[in-house]
Image: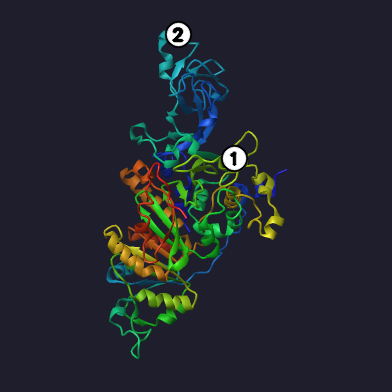
Amino acid sequence: MLSESARMTTAEEARYRIDYPNSKPRATKVIALDPASEAVVKRLAQGQWQQASFFTSLKFDGAPRGGEGWTMKAWLSDLAGRTKDLIDEVTSADLVVMVASAGTKPDAAGVIAEACGTRKVMTTALIIGSEASSDEELSKTLASLRPYTSMLVIASNDDYIEEMLVALRA
Amino acid sequence: MLRKEQNDLLTQTGPATPFGQMFRCYWVPALLAEELPENECPPVRVKLFSERLLAFRDTDGKYGLIDEFCAHRGVSLWFGRNEESGLRCPYHGWKYDVTGQCIDVPSEAAESGFCKKIKLTSYPLVKIGPVLWTYMGPPDKQPPLPEWEFSLVPPEQCFISKRLQESNWLQAMEGGIDSSHVSFLHRGDLGSDPLFKGAKGNKYNLSDMKPHFEVVEQPGGLYIGARRNAENGNYYWRITPWVMPNFTMIPPRGDHPMHGHFWVPIDDHNCWAWTYDFHPTRALTKDERAAMQAGQGLHCKYVAGSYRPLANKDNDYLMDRAAQKAGKTYSGIAGFAIQDSSLQESMGPVCDRTKENLVSTDNGIIMARHRMLRALKTFTDKGTLPPGVDPEHHKIRSVSIVLPPDQAFKDGARDALTRKLGKAQTTV
């Protein structure tokens, strides 16, 4: 007599797996950390996504740091230029993806990661354009992002981000 | 998740399939040399990439891998007589050499030249170390022989086994680059298996169950780095190279032998899980070899006279619920190899990746699929050879190392990630 495992691992039995959507759409927030990655994120935003939304943090460098002028609201914006509150966006996120290009030292990553860490939201950082950049440039960006994310991916091509977001059902 | 057409692309490896064509660009392990132990020994049936083949070793010690079936009436040549530099079909006496060339048709006059018009498909079969390798692609595209370190060290430094896995090759291979499962599925064995225990690195593994990951592309595939906290703010890194499409090397632990896998499709529902252990600078000890032969480490025990694991789906993998409950094993299944195969086979013959829900720590798997699909496109569109064919891509090593927090493993372990024959591995 066949064992349970032997019977259940057949192609015939695979047909009886219940066919239903076994997950709900997850909110993924994709944030560009520098001008080159912003161009990539803008291109990505043209695609069809379940619950992904796209942002830029380029105003971070000019924003006040600390003290009375400090705010979480002044520098994050959607791709139409509307200012967004980082805390609101992170609170409603299941995953935050930060995109940086090799050679940059994105200071916004620390603030975004802190907001995510407080709310237990997973972060992933992607470094793009590694093929065209020197090891030194890449290392600089890696070192600046490493403390702030549990998953760091160095991709030679921009097309990986799209592939990853699809794989994660963004 | 993958779309159905992507899943089909990566899991179908028969001769008429796109990925099957690309997979045939590589030298792959076909048999253990021990399966053809002497000249004129019995032939061995081999199925690879959904092709039924027969391996034999002729009177002169030459190896052949040919179509299993006689060109005359379709009889299996497994019943053949291996004699006088060829394999003779017992039905009507047709005889073939190791290249598949028919060299005798007794019913026809030798002068007629009839037998010269008969040739079976054949593939080269080359012994490197304890493994017989084959290349099943177009003869004019045959690449140089593989140069994996485990196959180049002296025999006393190496041990290799294979086991049948009753699932598609891809779900087996993806287990090998899924670093985050180790802390769960295999946690019971890190401290007890003789081929793992005692390494300082185990302490880092078991004290930090939430590793951080970095995935970096390299010419032949990927480096997947898992970092955990070490002393003084440093990081303990375990770096696994994956070389396209089916090779991984697991990061070393202490002075234990290094090890890893190849996964080779038999057909779309079965694959061979090859496991190698080697030490770069010393012979394996008697105890190490005995442990490997006894099925410890990444190896397994077999059903007598076969390469099928003793714990298999027919006996529910010898599930031990008491051991599971007591925490001796996490899943109730004993041994690294069967812990993996039991779960991977439970996915079904071909995992339906349209239903999976990957998370960000699965980026190694996502990137590997991406690399393979990208390579497949350029191979199909332009005929570009995929990464991993060039023997330069084989000159890699896995590494375990402690690095300062601001140092990229790609920089800090650059030298250690390069194969150096006869030189010690970098390990913690």
In percent of width and height, residue B411 lies at: 34, 58
Q: Can residue B258 be seen in this view?
A: yes
Describe residue A82's horizontal placement relative to residue B72 as left or right.
left
Camera-nearest residue between B39 and B98: B39
Which amino acid type corresponds to the residue marked 1 in the rendered image? Answer: Ala
Provide the chain ID for the residue under circle 2: B
Residue drawn at x 59%, y 40% as measured from the top left:
B290
Q: Report the coloring of the rendering.
A: rainbow
Tell me, yes or no, whether the two marked residues, 2 and 1, touch with CB atoms within 8 Å: no
Say the numbered circle drawn on residue B109: 2
Kindly indicate whether the residues beneath marks 2 and 1 are on one polypeptide chain.
yes
Query: Taking B315 as reference, is B105 above or below it?
Result: above
In percent of width and height, residue B391 lies at: 36, 41
Q: Is residue B390 visible?
A: no
In percent of width and height, residue B327 lies at: 66, 59
Residue drawn at x 46%, y 48% as measured from the top left:
B249
Q: What element carries label 2?
A: loop
Q: Mark 1 points at which residue?
A: B290
In percent of width and height, residue A108 lies at: 35, 76
Q: Residues within 10 Å of mark 2 (few under 14, many from 20)?
A: few
* Quadrant position of residue A72: bottom left
Q: What element carries label 1?
A: helix
Query: Taking A10 as reference, is B99 above or below it?
Result: above
Q: How crowded is mark 1: few (under 14 residues within 10 Å), some or many (20 or more)?
A: few
Which amino acid type corresponds to the residue marked 2 in the rendered image? Answer: Ala
Provide the chain ID for the residue under circle 1: B
Mark 2 → mark 1, Cα distance in angstroms: 55 Å
* Quadrant position of residue B224: bottom left
